[in-house]
Image (tube, grey):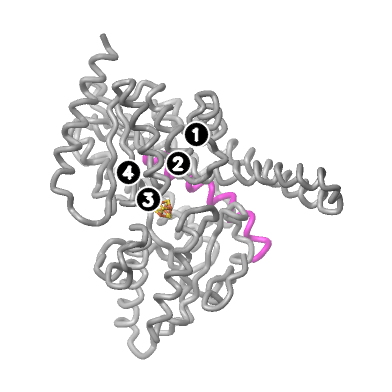
Amino acid sequence: MNHEFPFNNIKKIDIRGKKLLIPTMHPFGSHLLAACCRGFGIDAYPLPTYIDLNLGKQYTSGKECFPCQVTISDILYFLKKEEQKFKDNFNANNYVYLLPEADGPCRFGMYNKFQRIILNTFDNFKDVQISYFTTEDSYSTKGILPEDKASDFKKIGFLLMVVSDIFDRIQWRVRPYEKIQGSTDELIKNMLNEIIKVLEKKAEKLPFDEIYEILELTTIKAKNLINTKISRKPRIGIVGEIYLRTHQPSNQYIIKKIEQYGGEVVNASLCEWINFVTYENIRKTKLFLRVLVKENLYKYVFATMKKLMSLKIEQEYQRFIMKKAYSKVLKHLDIQPDHDVEELEKHLENNHIYSYEVGTEACLSIAGALCYMKEGFNGVVNVYPFSCMPSTITSAILRPIFKKFHFPYLDAPFDGTIQPNREIAIKTFMFQASQHKKLLKN
Ligand code: SF4
């Protein structure tokens, strides 16, 4: 993509020697990614998040998606603090703000351009550069990291996303049944720090085995925290927009709320999206190849086939890493395995409900929610930013289906305000979910 003026300060730039600022979306993922960057010699930091939401509100009109407001608040908060700290020595040129983007019909592709315009309104922040990963090239780090390091970084980066998902799943499986309140969160925090130490020391050497060992040790320790006398609780699946369902302050800690009212939660994973991006790129490349052959444009066929091959290798790599990491955990603890994006598509097609052709996260959310029902869950919550397009489509499609099957379903839109009836809605939903569990038993 060619970013023309005023977006000439958004590009894939070599980040060596700069302070890399990473938005905090996932409670572990951003920290692991930053530690990995440090292990590759890049001075990287996850941004403190959700500290002054008013900053984002001040520079937006209210029409933007909520994650855009949150991320603009976070970058402005951090830069203003740095400005106060370094006073006259503050140099905007030292910072690179990493803000990924997606193609397709969503506004996410516009966040970094919009935030560029906002940063340009500050004399002191104009020179802060914005760099990005994009779905267009399956989040390639080429152009950001030197050619010889980009591929290794991507390999270990994917493992870290899997680790983040698995830590989540261990936490959700154990926390509702823990003998000592708070022990699961404490364990995960400590084990996360163990991985961070390994990454800072030797990420460049790709310490996969050490990371797998920590993952297995975490599982064994976590299993011991469970009070086996507590019977299994209603299981709730979460789908929705990736930022909102993952960023806990934005969703007002909805997972803990559901647990408080007697549920056990499984949220859609980070890897589901990454797998989907690769899967989509394969699908689009195959289509393009067919067009080339049909139009006799053979001179482009070889390059396209090469691209297809490399995407297929990437897909196999992702499957291999996920299988290996999950197997380390599943032999000790029955966490929920991740959904396979190919299976999700088949599920949609077999039921003629929706199509991957339409794109966006709606296809994953709709298929994921229907799979939860099939897998014996007792309810589904759709978590999303107020007015989010794909999540509104998801809601419109899921509601009548779940109504037909008397399956508990809750829409949970968020925009940063406190909804007085949210608590009661979750409580009522959880009552329905526990009734559903009793019915399934009988
Ligand atoms: S998925 Fe929703 S919140 Fe995200 S950019 Fe699209 S419309 Fe906005």
Q: Which of marks 4 and 3 is nearer the N terminus?
A: 4
Which mark, by number, is residue 388?
3
User: Is the residue marked 3 within 8 Å of ligand 1, measured from its CB?
Assistant: yes
Q: Distance between the residues labelled 1 and 3?
A: 18 Å
Q: How far apart are marks 2 and 4 (CA)?
A: 12 Å
62 w.r.t. 206: above or below? below
Q: Which of marks 3 and 2 is nearer the N terminus?
A: 2
Q: Which of marks 2 and 4 is nearer the N terminus?
A: 2
Residue corresponding to mark 1: 354
Q: Earlier in the sequence, mark 1 or mark 4?
A: 1
Q: Mark 2 or 1, which is nearer the eye?
A: 1
Residue corresponding to mark 2: 362
Q: Mark 1 or 4, which is nearer the eye?
A: 1
Any magenta on residue 166?
yes
Any magenta on residue 64?
no
Q: Nearer the viewer, residue 115 or 164?
A: 115
Q: In this view, does 401 lie to the left or right of 199?
A: left
Dot 2 falls on a residue whose secondary structure is helix
Q: Which residue is drawn at 37% across and 24% down?
A: 373
Q: Distance between the residues labelled 2 and 1?
A: 9 Å
